[in-house]
């Protein structure tokens, strides 16, 4: 049975194997973007490269933003590409936060990309993609 | 069920300082994907919303899905507008809200 499971890791040419992304992720991603093309810039995500326990994965997100009335981060979305639920959390910020930085702990069912989207008051959406390898999955079956 | 709401604030702060606010609450955050030993689905039971207010102003809000770990922990930043009291509120799937209040020592 195990032999039939998709192998995660590196393919023969040493390139990272392409990870499958769930339909739920695709839907949630499209719902957040609403047609806006995300820009891969200014979002720093701190996640372990290897999570031994998928039930408990610390995450820090920081967005480089002036956090002024005219230009601030309104919303940070944490999306999972392979959990049973794609929407992990949504954080709402405003200029009073002064620094757009949040910390929490998340569950990862298996090795996957974690996508962070930051919606700005200007209408722009910033994005960051982080691969986390998971030894023991969280979320349960 | 939620229990033991906890928070950490700096011992004192000045107006204009950017402080870190940390909160934690004891909660199982049952995902709704797990089965018990008889194969029956264990119903979802999570904290789905967290709201932080400072005085009358909402300063931070989070919506959680089942992908947030048990005993949800949060940290966020705030620029101190003046003396005030934090109110942290965690709302459960069954509608129960657990509230903690914390004065900030502003010099």
Image (cartoon, coloured by chain):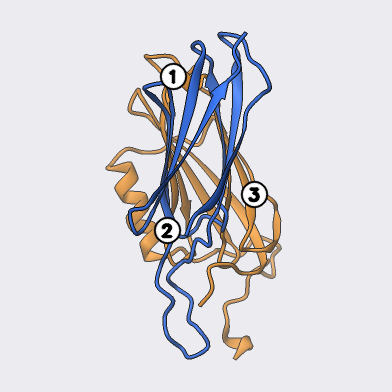
Q: Label 3: few (<14), some or many (≥20) within 10 Å?
A: some
How far apart are labels 3 and 2 at the CA level? 17 Å
Indicate whether B77 appears above or below B38. Answer: above
Disc 1 marks which residue? A95
How far apart are labels 2 and 1 at the CA level? 28 Å
Letter of the blue chain: B
Dot 3 or dot 2, earlier in sequence? 3
How far apart are labels 1 and 3 at the CA level? 25 Å
Indicate whether B92 appears above or below B82. Answer: below
Quadrant in the picture for residue A7: bottom right
Disc 3 marks which residue? A58
Q: Chain A appears what colour?
A: orange
Residues tagged 3 and 2 counted as in contact (Cβ below 8 A): no
In the rendering, at what x and y percent does residue B36 appear?
50, 83
Q: Is residue A99 visible?
A: no
The chain to which mark 3 is attached is: A
Dot 1 or dot 3, earlier in sequence? 3
């Amino acid at each position: 049975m195990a032999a039939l499971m998709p192998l995660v890791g590196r393919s023969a040419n040493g390139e990272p194997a392409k990870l499958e992304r769930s339909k739920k992720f695709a839907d949630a991603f499209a719902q957040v973007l609403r047609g806006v093309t995300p820009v891969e810039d200014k979002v720093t995500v701190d996640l372990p490269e290897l999570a031994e326990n998928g039930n408990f994965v610390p995450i820090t997100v920081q967005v480089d933003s002036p956090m002024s009335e005219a230009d601030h981060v309104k919303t940070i979305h944490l999306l999972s590409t392979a959990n049973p639920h794609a929407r992990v959390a949504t954080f709402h910020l405003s200029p009073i936060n002064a620094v757009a930085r949040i910390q929490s702990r998340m569950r990862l069912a298996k090795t996957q990309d974690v996508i962070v989207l930051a919606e700005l008051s200007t209408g722009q959406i910033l994005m960051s993609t982080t691969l986390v390898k998971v030894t023991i999955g969280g979320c349960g079956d | 069920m939620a229990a033991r709401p906890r928070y950490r604030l700096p011992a004192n702060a000045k107006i204009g300082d950017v402080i870190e606010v940390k909160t934690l609450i004891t909660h199982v955050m049952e995902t709704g994907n797990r089965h018990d030993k008889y194969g029956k689905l264990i119903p979802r039971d999570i904290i789905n919303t967290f709201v932080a207010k400072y005085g009358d102003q909402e300063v931070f809000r989070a919506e959680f899905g089942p992908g947030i770990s048990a005993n949800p922990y949060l940290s966020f930043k705030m620029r101190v507008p003046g003396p005030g009291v934090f109110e942290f509120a965690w709302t459960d799937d069954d509608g129960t809200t657990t509230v903690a209040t914390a004065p900030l020592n502003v010099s």
